[in-house]
Amino acid sequence: MSNDLKFGKFKAAYSGLYSEVTVDSIAVGNGDRVGVLFGEQEPIEFVNQVLLGENHPAKEYWNDVILTVKWAKSFADAVNANPAPVYLQGHEDFANGAMRQIPAGYIVGAKVDEEGDGRLLLRNRLFAEGKFSREVIDQTMREINAGVLNTSTGDYEKREWHYDEETEEIKVFAVESLKNQTNAIVERDMNASAASIIASNFKFTPCDADGNDTGAPVEYGEIFKQGEDSMDKKTLLGAIKTMFKDGAVTSTDLVEALGIELVDEDMKAKLATFKEVEALLGDVDVKEFVTNTLKAQDEAKEAAFAALKEEKLKAAFPDEGELRLARHMFSITDGDIDEEIKRIQGHEDMIAEHEAALMRMNYTPSAVAGGSADSGEWEA
């Protein structure tokens, strides 16, 4: 950023809220009731998402609850018909079930994005004047834009339990939101579902080091689109990483937006071959088949080597004593058997064993029998 944006009324890390979703991209549901609730107050709004599907289960005590698109649509329908409470201090309504808690705002609109695993998008509006002082609301705005807060969505819902006989697992699915739809602002890691705040319309007023305004207020999201004040590569990649982690952007989105292919021709050919192998094997797992095949090949190779080794040892060492010693001295499991046999034959232990073998056969050198040791002849 340039120096004139170095100071601002709200100092925050903005990249966590850089998203293709804007507050106004989610329509207000029941405009009449929202108008009565907020009147002419400044619309202080933010958007949170709740990711759906088996890849993003919500945690509930000992269960994982899978939030379905059907559940999300019923939640959105309920919110669009009647604004739902937003609590600023966590799930305040759980503190005392017999007492109605005063919310800090309301969910004023919702929609379901069915792309990929799907997500529920909620438009939340806080009271500029209400239960909490403006100082608390301002602090909450800063905390949201700094990425240190999150949301926890609650309701009474209809569920289905599915039992998988093969895995002996029970999966729990939320299939309908029945009543008491709420949103609670919580610490960033205290939500049970895969939820995150992804956009806001909070204003940023650039100012100097003394706090004097140096420009007109702008929305946080617009800071990244102001010419020379646009994000540098490191910040941009960090923002994309955050969006990807939160599920706001998918690999498909990146491929389409950048006009690139993540898989080259070589990889496509290998993938096609792999699919052909899968088709040939049918129900057999490819990894298991390859592992077993390689193991069988190794075992066959070891058996062939052992058989050839035994055959050559018997040919080189006809005496049983020498053969036993040769087997003991043989040290390789792969390679040139003949070279190993030559090594063994030249070893001093084998030479001594060979001489002992000759003695056992009643052979004596010709020199001992009265002949010449240099004749190279042996006689009994």
Image (cartoon, helix red, strand yellow):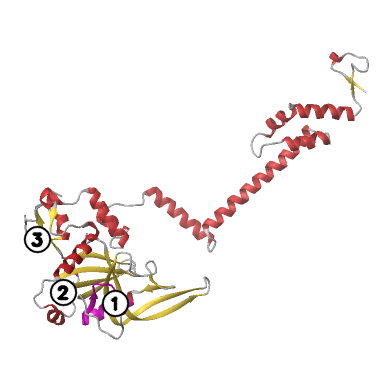
Which residue corresponds to mark 3? 217
**Amino acid type for the residue under numbered disc 2:** Phe
Q: Secondary structure at mark 2?
A: loop
> Label 2 vs label 1: CA separation?
26 Å
Q: Relative to residue 324, is residue 58 depicted above or below?
A: below
* Element at label 3: loop
Q: Earlier in the sequence, mark 3 or mark 1?
A: 1
| Disc nearer the start of the sequence (3/2) | 2
Q: Is residue 86 magenta?
A: yes
User: Which residue is label 2 attached to?
Assistant: 127
Circle 3 or circle 2, nearest the eye: 2
Residue at the (20%, 58%) spot, across then down: 12
Residue 114, percent from left and from top: 30, 70
Label annotation for residue 73? 1
Q: Amino acid at mark 3?
A: Pro
Q: State the residue at coordinates (36%, 52%).
A: 263
Nearest to viewer (mark 3 / mark 1)? 3
